[in-house]
Amino acid sequence: MGRIRRVEVVANLASGGVGKDAPAEIEKIFADHGLKAHVCAPATHDLTNCLRAAVDAGPDLLVTLAGDGTARAAAELCGPDGPMLAPLPGGTMNMLPRALYGPRRWQDALTVALAEGEERTLGGGEVEGHPFLVAAVLGSPALWGPAREAARYREPMLALAWARRAVRRAFSGRLRYAIEDGPRAKAEALIFGCPLVSRVMADEEQALEAAALDLRGAADVFRLGINALVRDWRDDPAVEVRRCRRARAWAVGGIPALLDGELVRLHAMAEVIYRPAVVRMLALPKDV
């Protein structure tokens, strides 16, 4: 890894997949590859400041060991001209790390990335100035994301609570949207997938995979929720997928959204656009 000399690491020890011994483990893994890493393990409330300081230090590689929100924030701070980023799985959903490194533990993901990784500039989406590299879900079905992960981690009561919340929000205010220069239409939700995870687009394709979910009743919501829990949302008959580079959405009172696994709330009007270069990643070759 001759191109990597300076390494900054931000580890959230309070995150679900990170233990108190993580800093020492990280330092050892880097030492085994002939590298010295500066590790910052801040309190949760100081995580953003630690990220900014790590980027400002000008490293060749920034490693995050935390949840999806931290990984997405790091990508936003790095941008296409900043440090190369390696987001390790340290949270609940781990959407970006899974897309880059597969379902590996963070120790294994870091080891194989240092041994076999390559620099890759990733394109993705942006909404209200915030990038996403995996997927964005706009509308009430965004609330199914936490339910799915709670079920995956065998927390049935938490999964049920999120599922009930998603059902309560359903049909409380349908989105109005326009994809590209097309006509305005209505949908319960919009989903935008990036080339990194698309089943139908190559990584180098300069577009997002956009889908409008036409849900007409509680039965459709329940079916979509089951599909989100057990298989790909694209398999649901209420989903029709198309490519786009720009879309707009409107809703009364704001739009719940899931950006790379992070639940956020957008303004009443949001524009989603494709960015060809969001961040440089330390990624595995596609055949690994």
Image (tube, rainbow, N blue to C red):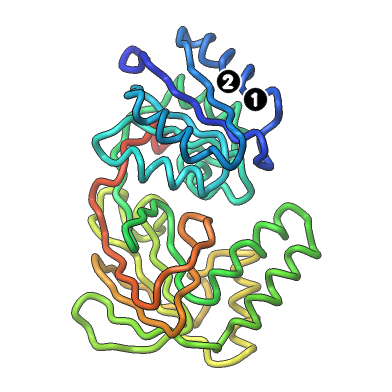
Estimate the x, y position of residue 94 in percent, counting from the top left.
56, 46
Closer to us: 8 or 260: 8
Name the residue at 59% across, 69% down. 143
Q: Label for residue 22?
A: 1
Check disc 2 and report the residue beneath it. Answer: 26
Estimate the x, y position of residue 82 in percent, counting from the top left.
29, 33
189 in relation to 61, above or below: below
Q: Are marks 1 and 2 in contact (CB under 8 Å)?
A: yes
Closer to us: 46 or 263: 46
Residue at the limit of the structure toward the left, as seen here: 181
Name the residue at 38% across, 42% down. 75
Element class at badge 1: helix
Question: Image check: 101 left or right of 244?
Answer: right
Estimate the x, y position of residue 65 in percent, counting from the top left.
55, 34
The image quarter containing residue 280 is: top left
Q: Amino acid at mark 2?
A: Ile
Estimate the x, y position of residue 50 in percent, counting from the top left.
48, 33
204 in relation to 136, above or below: above
